[in-house]
Every structure is written in structure tokens, then in C-alpha cells.
Amino acid sequence: MAETTTSALSPEIQAAVNADTKTQLDDGVEKRVPLLLGDPSFNDVTEIVCRPVEWTVPRAWYIFFGCAAMLLGVLVLSTAYLFWEGTGIWGLNNPVSWGWAIVNFVFWVGIGHAGTLISAILFLLRQKWRTSINRFAEAMTIFAVMCALLFPTIHVGRVWLLYYVFPLPNQMAMWPNFRSPLLWDVFAVTIYGTVSIVFWYTGLIPDLATLRDRAKTRVRRIVYGIFSLGWRGSARHWQHYEKAYGMLAGLATPLVLSVHSVVSFDFAVAQLPGWHTTIFPPYFVAGAIYSGFGMVITLMVIARKLFGLERIVTLRHFDNMAKITLLTGSIVGYAYSMEFFIAWYSGNPYETFTFINRAFGPYAWAYWIMVTCNVIVPQIFWFKKARTHMGVLFVVSILVNVGMWFERFVIVASSLSRDFLPSSWDYFSPTIWDIAAFVGSFGLFFFMFSLFVRFLPMVSMAEVKTVLPKADPHHGHHDDDHGDDHHGDDHDHGDDDAKEEEE
Amino acid sequence: MSHSPKKITAQDIELPQNSLWRKLPLIGVALAVIGLGASAGIAWKGGKLHPQFYFSYLVAYAYWLSLALGGLFFVIVQFAARAGWSVVVRRIAEHAMLALPAFAVLFIPIALGLHDLYHWSHAEAVAKDLVLQDKAAYLNTTGFYTRAGAYFILWFVLAWYFWKKSTAQDESKEAAATKRMQIVAGPSIVIFALTLTFAAFDWIMSLDPHWYSTIFGPYYFAGTTLAIFSFISLMGVLLQRSGVLKDVITSEHYHDLGKLIFAFTVFWAYIAFSQYMLIWYGNIPEETVWFKHRGGAWLGMSIFQGVGHFAVPFFFMINRTIKRFKPTLIIGALMVLTVHYFDMYWLIMPTYHHHGPHFTIVDLTTFVGVGGVFLAVFGYGLARHKLIPAGDPRLKESLAFKNI
């Protein structure tokens, strides 16, 4: 297990990685091209994935980590001042009593959704390409949920009374309002966070065992050993693992829909024009997946380059992710047009006003940023060239999240600022503290993320190995590749198959 | 190859000459003539057709159209997703989608019954109603016909393109055809989504011209997907019972179809619940009126939507064995196809029967009549072409497919 084997790629593999889009994606319909490039062995996968965890940490990581830590510091300071002074430091005013805090909350919850879609729904749909990106996206989900939970927590003003949001028995017999969607949010997001962590950790166990077995220092051996829960890779372990994984996928699937639906209820149960519309739940879910894929692409474009994952995360993966981005972006565009159409069709002057006001009123600038970034920009993904060009992917994926942030801002600010009583209309402008909290939340996100790529395998080695052609028990009838495998490499997935074999 | 798929012979994928299936076009035409003739005969009162005819007809139309549209959806999604597993069942959906052009002809009675069906089509009613005056820019007869024409042209183009290309591939075995269809499938989804949505608005939602719901398109869409997955399962099993497609469609494919029925049962419930919950919670009179019309004597059927359309199929289809065992799978499929009819009835009929469900013989005869046309076209496709896309480059993958 020489650590250097993968740092320099052999010419053939380098050629496979550099092969043009046509070779990498064009499967000529008759057969499926392999998901990983350069026909890696099981050991190759282990080496590639473990390298960033085991190598000498490069300076780039320290720089990135340092920047994230500084942003996190901004968050901590601005939050401290918020606790000291109260929510008055934000730009809230009378009609716009919900400002950036709720916008940021919805923004971050949404980002998490791609991880759950990739890990749960694509698993149930047998989308094998997901194995290269699911660990990464699931980690993103957890960190995004952390950022999301931050905002409702700090926006309550008296943060020491936060426990009121939980239905805790108390001598004053005070209960939260069970008919309030804000309480449903508490349940939905905490369940979401819990299931995401359990799912993510379950998937990590075999890989942690691999890291344990490869560990060269005592501390590593003990820490990874504790967290790998005594995994030995026996057939029985795998059987339990696969069952648990399938069931968690089944449980997490409704969460992809339910969490953001409940978040959309925060708005849609109100009677405010622009908030109250029946398409909100599926529209929010599509938007969430859209923004989540935006974030996965942004991070993956960088991580793939930085950590040499080109053989594992290929153009095929980006092509697929861009297609999902296009699909969900178009669903979001469909929802915008439905809202607009029905506002006109309804003949309801309040509805009509709200939408005219969005497009041409004081928030028109935000509205058109939203439409451009969410509906128009992703249409470039109709073209394969764009779907496989790292530069285009990177720029578009960032615009996706700019657009999605503005979508939530438009919904919150434009509807509230122009409500039923014209004399109370006002315009929302953020203060420096609004901006500090939002920017700071990126600090928290990237801080956690840099720790993740440093200490945990960012690709699910065990799962990637199952989609290698070699993992097929009928592949070629030679088992030479098993030579220097580690515990995590056992692959009993084909067992059922083998029994049913008639040969 | 791993699972050594069975070698397919001509007998497996073509209907025998003496098969009853070959008479399906004739049977369908007979059903259409009898059903529509009887409907018209029964509903003919005082020199014109009774409004009951038009409403019953619209329910039947919405029902069978959802199968044809579902077929189109199934086909384009398989190509867009480059799916392999579904090749052996895709032909069933292709023939279902071939019925789409026939629905242009079947639209004639709806056009004739416009005044009986749609309140907004009465100039004198609009003159008295400020809301309808506001909406007249959309809800007017010319617009209604023009839009319907556009839907039918687009559906015809899509259905014909995919059907022709796929059936031609049986002989040509050209992989290029699959590639071409994969490319066309993407934009087709956009066209499908928009036409289905506005057709649902025009033909069903505008029955109650004051009412509106942005989720109405996805609601009708959810029904079409359920209908087609159930229909494919049912036809697959019935075809196999007559001795064809043996070992071609396996319990693995049925398992997947069952999973789709299960998933879209939940999706339908999700959409239906979203619509109901938000309107109930908002409690705005102009929206709640639609559900008010579905209370009272209609309440039983409204509750049935929750139980029959969601709870029962949900708990039934969740089981793995039930999805893989043909007799139980078709029980589930038939159940879904039945409740789907009541869903359409529940959407449309309260506009006419304010005081509660009132089933008449015309409901049955129109159902048989429109269904006859659908089955005739479906049967025509079955008899003329191989029962599976025999030239599809992914056929081998589909034959060897296993759920792991």
C-alpha cells in the first residue's frame, strides 16, 4: 500500500481522464460506459480516496480552512452582538418583520436536499453513478442543516428561551401552537437532521474501518477504530449493513419531499398574496433540489481537481448532475409561470397586484436576478458542451445559488413590504449585521466542510467498488484484483446473484 | 453474459394469428359504437342531448385521456433517462400513447356540449359576473378551441414521432434511432408538462370558473402516471396469460412497475393533500368553495379519495411479494385504475350534481364508448407490431434485468 502510487497517473489512465467528452459519455447506446475512468482496481479506489485523508496536508487546505475559520469568527461576533442587543440590529421593519433570517434558513435547508436526493432517492432508483458523489453530498446536507438551524435559533431574540419551541411539559402548562407551521418546521428539520446524520454515518462505517486498518499512527487507529464500531467486513456485517442502508433510504425518501414542503407551509398557509398558493410545496421541493445540486457542483468542481478525484468523479457525473439541475430549474420556472398565470387567471386584484409588483415594483431588481439565475441560466445545460465544461459548470452552479437565495428574498420581502394596508408599506434594507450573519454562515459551512475533507473519506469507497465492472461476480471469471484488498473492500453484494445463477 | 437471458423467438413477441387480442380493434370499435350510441340514445331528450351526457362523457374522456397521456409520459421519460429495465414493457405504453390523436376526434362532443359544461361560455352569464369578465381574456370560446387545437397537434406530433420511430426500429435495429429519441425526449417533457397543465385547466378546472389552484396541473399529472403504470402492469399480465411474452416480462419488471405505482400513489396523495391542506388552512372563501361543493352528500366520496386512492393502495403495494406476484399485482393495478375513475368523477361531477353523487347508466355507457376507441387504437398497435421493441439496443439489458 504505497501511498505514492496514485499521485502520478500512468499514461493510459491520464489519457482516459483527459479523453474528450465524446469518448467519456458517448456510449453508443448499445453498452454502458464504465462509471470510473481508467479501469481502476479495488485498491486504486482505496488509494485515491484515502490519499487526502492520509497525505501531508497541503498549504491550500490551510488557507481555505483559515478563511473559513475567519468567516466563522464573523458569525460568532455578529451573533454575540445580536444576543447582546436584540434583533433590532437587523434591518427588520414593521411590515417586513421576517427578514434575512428566514431567507437564510430556507436557503440553507434547501441546499441540503440534493444530498438526500442523491443518497436516498437515487439509491432507490438504482442510479449507480450516485456512489461517487453521495458521501460528499450527504456531508453537505448535514452542514447545510446546521447552518439552517442556526437562523431560527438566533432570530427568536431571547435565545435563552429557545426551548419553548419544543413541546416540553412544564408547570405553566404552556405549549407551542401545534397548528403553527413554525412548530412543524421544528419537527421536520430536526427529524431531517437526525436521519441525515444516521444515514451518513451508517454509510461511513465500512470506510472508517478501511481507514482504521490503514492507520499508521496510534491516535488514528483508536479514533477510526472507535467510530468503525468493530466492523470486520464479514458477510453477516454486510448483510445487516445493506438491509439497514436500504431501509434508511426508504425512510429518507419522504423526507426529501416533506421537509421543504413543511418549510413552504410557513408561507403558504398564510393569506398573503404571493405566499398563499397551492403549488408551493412541490415548487419548494424542486427549488431545494435545484439549489442543492448547484452547491454540489460548485464544491465538486474544486474538490475533484484539488484531491485528484478525476477517475472517480467523471464527466458522466457532471453531465448527470447538470441534467438534474436543468430539470429542477425548469420545474421552478414552471412554478413561477403557474403563479403568474393563476394570478392573472384568478381575476383577483390582490394576486395580480402582488405579481406585477414583484416584476416591476421596488424589488424588481431582485425578481429579475431570480428569474435570470433560476430559469434562464440553467437552460444552457441543454447543451452537452456546457454540462461537461468545468468553467461553465462552476459559474452556473454559483448563479443557481445566487438565484435561489434571491427567490426566497423576493417571496419574503416583496409580499410583506406591500401588504393589504398601503399606509404601512415600507422597504426592507439589510444592515451590516444581516450581511455578517449570512456571510458568517458560509464560514460555518466551509469550516465544517474543510474538516470533513481532511478527516473523512469524501467518496464512499465501499459503494464505489460495488459499481466497478470487477464487482460483478460474473465479470471475466478472474479474481486477481482481490490481492491486496483491505477489510472494507469485501464485496458480498453479488451473493444473492450467485445463488440465482443457473450456470 | 451474466444472467444468460433467454433467446427470444418470434412466438414470444408476436400475437398468434388466432389470438383474441387480434380482434381487440374490432371489439373496441364495437364497444365504441355501442357505448356512444347507447349514451346518445339514452340522453336524447327533447331534440337535444341531456347535460348529463356531456358531464358523463367528460369524466370518461378525462379518464381515458389520462392513460394516453400517461403512455406518452412513460415513453419520453424512458428515453430521457436512457432507461434499460423498461424496454420490454415500453411497447404497451407506446400503443397507449398512440390513442392521443383519437382524442382529437373524441373531443367533438365536448366542443358541442360547451354550453352545457362550461358556465363561462354563456355571454349573458359573463355579462352579470365581474369576475368572469376579468377572466374573459382567457376563458372564451375562441381561446378554448384554439388551445385545444394546439394541444392535439402537439400531442399528435409527439405520439406519432415516438411511435413511428420505435416501431420502425423493430426491423431496422438502428441504435441511431434510440439516440435520436433520447435527444427529442428532453424538449418533449417541456411540451408535455405545459400542454397537460393547460388542458387540465381548460377542461376540468374551468368547470368551476371562479376557482383556481396553481397545483391543478400536477394533480391531473399524478393521476395519469398512476393510470399508466397500472395499465402497463395489467396488460403485461394479460398478454402473458395468452401465452406470449413468456420470460420476457419477468417478476423483476413487475416489481419495478409495482414500485412506481406505490411511489406515485404517495405522490398523488402528496399533491392532493397539499392542495386540500393549504386551501383549508387559508380558509379564503373563493378557494374553499370548491371543497364546499365536495362536502355534504359528496363528503363520502371525498373521504374515499383519502382511503381508496391513498391508504389502501399504499398499504397494499408496500409489500414486496405483492408487487412481484402477478395475481396480487393486478389486484393493485385494478384497484388504482378503479379509484382513478372516481377521482375524475369527483373532480368533474360536483359541478353538475351539486347535491351528491348520482350515478346513471350514461356514466357507464360513455365510459365504455370512449374506452372502446382507446382500446381499438391500442389493439391496432398490438396486432400490427411486435409486442416489445425488438430492435432496441437495450433490449438485452432489459431481458437480463434484476432488482438487486
Image: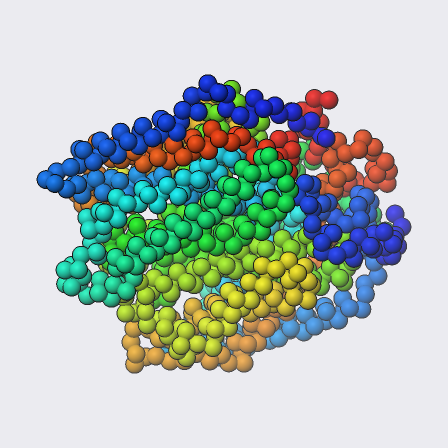
Most foreground residue, B403 or A153: B403
Residue at image x 48%, y 57%? A331
Residue A169 in view in this figure: no
In this view, B27 is above or below A28: above
Q: Residue B6 appears in which quarter of the rendering?
A: top right
Residue B262 in the figure: left or right of residue A380: left
Residue A384 % position (x, y): 64, 58
Most foreground residue, A94 or A340: A340
Quarter holding the C terminus of chain B is: top right
Q: Residue B137 appears in which quarter of the rendering?
A: bottom left
Quarter holding the N terminus of chain B is: top right
In this view, A395 is above or below A140: below
Residue at image x 59%, y 55%? A323
Q: Residue A88 appears in which quarter of the rendering?
A: bottom left
In this view, A159 is above or below B33: below
Most foreground residue, A243 or B30: B30
Residue A462 % position (x, y): 72, 43
Residue at image x 48%, y 34%? B92
Residue at image x 43%, y 30%? B379
